[in-house]
Amino acid sequence: MIVLGIETSCDETAAGIIRTDETGQGRILADVIRGQVEAHRAFGGVVPEIAARAHVEVVDAVVGQAMRDAGLGFADIDLVAATAGPGLIGGLLVGLTTGKAVASAAGLPFRGINHLEAHALTARLTDGLDFPYLLLLVSGGHSQFILVEGVGRYRRWGTTIDDALGEAFDKTAKLLGLPYPGGPEVEKRALTGDPKRFAFPRPLADRPDLALSFAGLKTAVRLAAERTHPLDDQAIADICASFQAAVADVLAIKSARALARFRAETGSDSPALVAAGGVASNTAVRAALSRAAGDAGGRLVVPPPRLCTDNGVMIAWAAAERVAAGLDDDPALTARPRWPLDADAAPLVGYGRQGVKV
Ligand code: KG4
Ligand code: ZN
């Protein structure tokens, strides 16, 4: 089966094409990603309206490029998929409409895909991982532990009760006058910093559950920056290193707890911890997770950075997995800004007007 996947939920316009064989393994035929960092830089974060317009401008070209890279025509495609949520509504509508239009014009079936599910299943494409495994998704919009039991079978064990981790990196960077996106910049500065100079909190580390929180840490960073004013390069580096150390500690503690639960509930004595999302490319974070996985008798699996962050390949792959699993999807599916993976579960934090909050 050959699947075209389109992703436009945040600030990446992406199209990927994969081919799956009879054994269910997938091969990447095209992987085109067009970022929008320049369009948002002046604002220090993603501006939803600017993102939507930027997607409209390039989505045709991105899909066209993917088709050329794969050397295929639409007649060769078996299925079209696009991210239907969660994400920024304007961008979602652009990708979803494009996907449905392509499918309709070419007489092909269409599937709307949950972006989180696509992140959750990527490690099966890249590493041939078997179910079940534990996923830690840490991106600009999400921070959650998910038990992945099978295709379409996810249980959210813990989530952030306030900011996403990537957001905390970005806000820390902004506060210190570092350019957007902040994550890679904080990591770079931390290299020459002293992680012990500032004693930042390890939020919720002493709570027995898997909830995460980063808003308090962000405030601690702001207070430290104000106290240390004026900030020289060394102070900035020390704050970055201390912030990153706090983050790595919290993730290691919570991951150890999640892995213990995984072992207890699944009976597995060699658990796989999969890390995905932009923050998973942080070396200190990976080292902490790798230690936690090793201590639990398991291993850390991190897909290559290009497939860890937003891309079209993972959307195509998730669609292929859902078809292979015999899951029937609603072709009329519309964009869903909020779409938790375990939609039927009780809310971990609470309900907003539009449903489960996080
Ligand atoms: O997964 P992603 O590309 O997009 C979504 O949010 O879906 O994640 C982007 C986030 C940004 O907040 C960025 O600052 C963060 O991931 N990030 C990092 C690093 N690279 C990207 N955070 C820490 N260290 C990094 N090396
Ligand atoms: Zn994402």
Image (cartoon, helix red, strand yellow):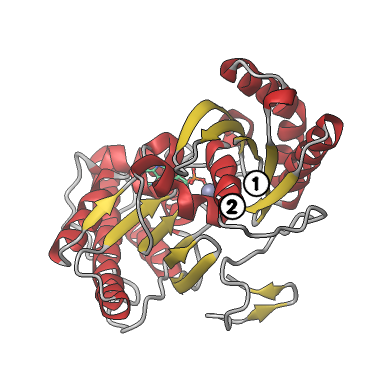
Sequence-wise first label, 1 or 2: 1
Ligand 2 lies under 8 Å from the Cβ of mark 2: yes
Task: Please indicate whether residue 156 sits to the left or right of residue 2 in the image.
Answer: left
284 lies left or right of 220: left
SS for tag 2?
Answer: helix
Considering depth in this image, is 342 or 41 the residue closer to the camera? 342
- Confirm if mark 1 falls within 8 A of ligand 2: yes
Dot 1 corresponds to which residue? 9
Relative to 253, is 69 above or below? Answer: above
- Residue located 68% across and 25% down the image: 76
Secondary structure of the residue carrying numbered label 1: loop
Identify residue for label 2.
Answer: 115
Q: Position of residue 296 (x, y in %)?
A: 17, 67
Quarter of the rendering containing residue 313: top right
Amino acid type at mark 2? His
Mark 2 nearby-residue class (10 Å; few <14, some 14–19, many ≥20)? many
Is 330 placed above or below 6 here? Answer: below
